[in-house]
Amino acid sequence: MQIGIVGLGLIGGSLAKAAKKQTQHTVLGFDQDKRVLQNALTTGAIDGTLPSSALPDCQIVLVALYPQATVDYILSHKTDFGPHTIVVDCCGVKEVVCSPCEAAATEYGFTFIGGHPMAGIEHSGFAHSKADLFVGASMILTPPVKSNPAAVKSVSDFCRELGFERIQLSTPTEHDRMIALTSQLAHILSSAYVKSPSALTHAGFSAGSFKDMTRVARLNENMWTELFFDNRPALLSEIEGLIQRLEEYAAALRQNDRESMRLLLKEGRERKEIVG
């Protein structure tokens, strides 16, 4: 197959490198930063560039841009995709992306499937991309209700070639509700946690827990701000729920209530045993 990849940052660059390492597909790439594009060509991450004229011949086009940039790209090229082209976005939110892109696909005759690679590191950019980023990871796909099963299978099979261990099918609404907890809240919590004044003098007093809790505070604030506000209601609900739960622990300390604290911790341990 001919694979097109738009945006060669951490995710797009890793998709390109994985496809080149794990498959025999031809990989064409595009990035608005000419230095990144040249680096991808020089290092063999892509076989060539991806002009608009090459889009109709791509069986799969992966768009790895910020949400609004993704929508803008797909809508601006809606007449360029071929009838056999499957366009897959790689955004961390789905409803704001899938709605306009599904409509364009229906009107102009290409296939669109929402996607979210559940993998990443605390660094961004092509320089940090790697071919094994997706090994053992999950890929969430949010195909339209009336999507072609063959197209979903084609994308699923390709993802498995890249190293994804699990393909999770979902709806855009369910995806955004769940990702507010499993990803977005974790980034908010990490950012707030590391702002404690004590964190500035933690050396010698911290072990793995501090490192684990603060790892994703080293984030791309521009991208994550867009993701947070694109999923504002679901994320706000999770933040407010967390604040309420934290207040229970604070109340136990204020009231010198050891038994309440013990029960709160017991509940947390038991919940962890359930969720894994």
Image: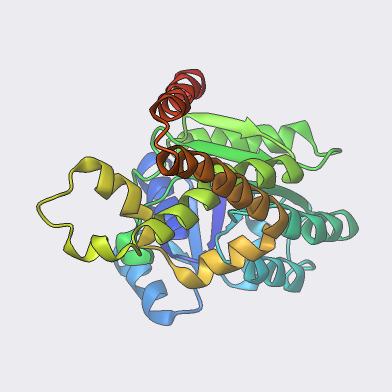
State whether residue 19 appears in this view. Answer: yes
Q: Specify the quadrant of the image occupied by residue 36.
A: bottom left
| Viewport quadrant of the C terminus | top left
Q: Is residue 47 above or below residue 136?
A: below
In-image side of 152 versus 246 (left or right): right
Q: Specify the quadrant of the image occupied by residue 232.
A: bottom right
Q: Position of residue 233 (x, y in %)?
A: 72, 55
| Numbered disc total | 0
Residue that sits furthest to the front in the current view: 255
Residue at 43% of width from left, 41% of height from top?
23
In-image side of 188 versus 79 (left or right): left
State whether residue 46 appears in this view. Answer: no
Residue at 38% of width from left, 56% of height from top?
193
Q: Is residue 7 above or below residue 261?
A: below
Q: Specify the quadrant of the image occupied by residue 169.
A: top right
Q: Position of residue 235 (x, y in %)?
A: 63, 53
Name the colouring of the figure.
rainbow
Q: Position of residue 74 (x, y in %)?
A: 71, 66
144 or 25: nearer the viewer: 144
Residue at 68% of width from left, 44% of height from top?
177
Residue at 45% of width from left, 53% of height from top?
189
Q: Is residue 212 above or below residue 63?
A: above
252 or 7: nearer the viewer: 252
Residue that sits furthest to the left in the current view: 204
Q: Position of residue 1 (x, y in %)?
A: 56, 46
Q: Is residue 190 above or below residue 156?
A: below
160 or 2: nearer the viewer: 160
In-image side of 148 versus 121 (left or right): right
